[in-house]
């Protein structure tokens, strides 16, 4: 006589090596899970119906407590587990906060970059008006940058690089181009207005395309060539109508474009690829220090000792305010190095094309602020030429983003 009224048969797995659990994390499949047969004896007839209902409820309660959902398909029972809710809102909120913080940091650095550029051009022009020695001024500005770099390295605010002989040989042409480019820019700022110098320096993309074609055989796209047309035309229109036009100022500004783009060519052709220990900031720091060491004797040979106490006393007797001159020299040197340092920091955060767009906007800000501060007389045609040239620079930065489609053979 059977005493067991309700039994569950044992699991029957044809392959003992197979696991009863499927590999899917969201569903669990029990293979060959079968319910045992209920004994059909007399005892079944003698039990009251309430026993079956209460036993069934207890059985279902136990199954539903352990298995969230049960569905039957064929002879197999599929058990689907309810996925646990992951608090993704906190992770998404953290990502949004990080992105917002990065955007705010980038915007603030762009503002500092523009502000330092404005003050550098104002202080530099004020100094060169009363102290027309651009080589000495450039050496002094690079000297201020050298002291700031040594302070940064000395207090471990930034890692100090290790320069090898092969790296030094590769860096030396960059140093010459860097020193000469800054010197020529100061010569131009001493001869013509700040706005006109920066309008001419908007021609840099033209020389970048020219040197890339000559030295690297890089044929520019149609969009890049089209963007150069308003640059050249705008600079020509602004030059013809510039009230402070001076051939020395014009030629030195144009020559600074050539040297700056030559520096880029040298950096591509001569930098040692195997030794990538120099990042952008350390490379700029090394260029500043070596340029300062080269410009000090060059300034003495070209202009003599124009920063000695005896000369400053003589200049003060002629009405030059030495204290204001030294203060503006220090401020120009601080702004000169700081804005370039911030520029390289921004370059590490964004792409070169985005940096070029920011640089074109910076040139607009510097031109407008210098015109307002110095009350530079500017004609409508001159302002139109400047606007066309700057619009061409912006179009050039956008055209560089357009990638050529590979030719289908």
Image (tube, helix red, strand yellow):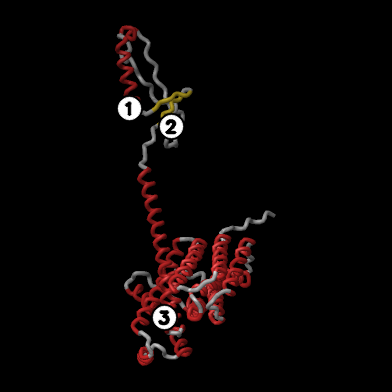
Q: Is residue 113 left or right of 267 when viewed as pictured? A: left
Query: Which quarter of the figure is the N terminus placed in?
Result: top left
Q: Are marks 2 and 3 in contact (CB under 8 Å)?
A: no
Name the N-terminal-most of marks 2 and 1.
2
**Residue located 30% across and 9% down the image:** 48
x then y, percent, for residue 294: 46, 84
Q: Quadrant of residue 10?
A: top left
User: How far apart are the two marked residues, 1 and 3, measured between alpha carbons?
Assistant: 85 Å
Say which of marks 2 and 1 sits in front.
1
Provide the secondary structure element on which disc 2 rests. loop
Q: Is residue 55 above or below residue 272?
A: above
The answer to whether residue 195 is left or right of residue 54 is right
Secondary element at tag 1: helix
Q: Mark number for residue 255? A: none
Residue position for label 2: 16
Q: Position of residue 329 (x, y in %)?
A: 38, 80
Residue shown at 35% from the left, 25% from the top: 64
Of circles 2 and 3, the one toward us is 3
Residue annotated with mark 1: 65
- 10 Å crowding of disc 2: few (<14), some (14-19), many (20+): few
Q: Is residue 209 above or below residue 17?
A: below
Quarter the C terminus occupies: bottom right
Task: Please tell me the numbered disc located at residue 127.
Answer: 3
């Amino acid at each position: 006589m059977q005493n067991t009224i309700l039994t569950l048969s044992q699991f029957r797995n044809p392959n003992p090596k197979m696991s009863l659990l499927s590999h899917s994390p969201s569903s669990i499949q029990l293979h060959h899970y079968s319910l045992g047969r209920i004994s059909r004896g007399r005892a079944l007839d003698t039990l009251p119906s309430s026993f079956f209902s209460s036993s069934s409820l207890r059985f279902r309660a136990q199954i539903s407590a352990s298995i969230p959902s049960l569905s039957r398909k064929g002879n197999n029972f599929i058990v689907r587990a309810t996925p646990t809710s992951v608090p993704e809102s906190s992770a998404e909120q953290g990502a949004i906060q990080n992105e917002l913080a990065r955007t705010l940091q980038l915007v603030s650095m762009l503002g500092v970059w523009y502000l330092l550029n404005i003050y550098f051009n104002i202080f530099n022009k004020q100094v060169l008006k009363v102290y027309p020695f651009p080589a000495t001024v450039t050496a002094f500005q690079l000297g201020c940058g050298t002291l700031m770099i040594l302070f940064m390295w000395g207090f471990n605010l930034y890692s100090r690089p290790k320069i090898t002989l092969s790296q030094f040989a590769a860096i030396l042409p960059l140093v010459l181009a860097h020193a000469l480019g800054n010197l020529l820019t100061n010569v131009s700022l001493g001869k013509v207005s700040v706005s006109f110098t920066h309008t001419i320096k908007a021609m840099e993309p033209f020389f970048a395309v020219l040197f890339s074609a000559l030295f690297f055989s890089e044929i520019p796209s149609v969009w890049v060539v089209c963007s150069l047309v308003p640059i050249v035309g705008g600079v020509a229109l602004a030059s013809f109508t510039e009230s402070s036009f001076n051939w020395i100022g014009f030629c030195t500004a144009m020559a600074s474009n050539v040297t700056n783009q030559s520096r880029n060519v040298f950096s591509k052709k001569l930098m040692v690829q195997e030794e990538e220990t120099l990042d952008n900031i350390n490379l700029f720091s090394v260029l500043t220090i070596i340029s300062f060491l080269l410009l000090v004797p060059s300034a003495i040979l070209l202009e003599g000792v124009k920063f000695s106490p005896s000369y400053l006393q003589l200049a003060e007797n002629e009405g030059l305010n030495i204290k204001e001159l030294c203060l503006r020299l220090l401020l120009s040197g601080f702004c000169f190095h700081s804005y370039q340092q911030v520029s390289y920091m921004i370059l590490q955060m964004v792409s070169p094309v985005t940096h070029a767009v920011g640089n074109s906007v910076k040139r607009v800000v510097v031109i407008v602020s210098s015109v307002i501060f110095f009350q530079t007389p500017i004609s409508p045609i001159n302002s139109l030429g400047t606007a066309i040239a700057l619009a061409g620079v912006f179009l050039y930065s956008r055209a560089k983003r357009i990638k050529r489609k590979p030719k289908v053979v």
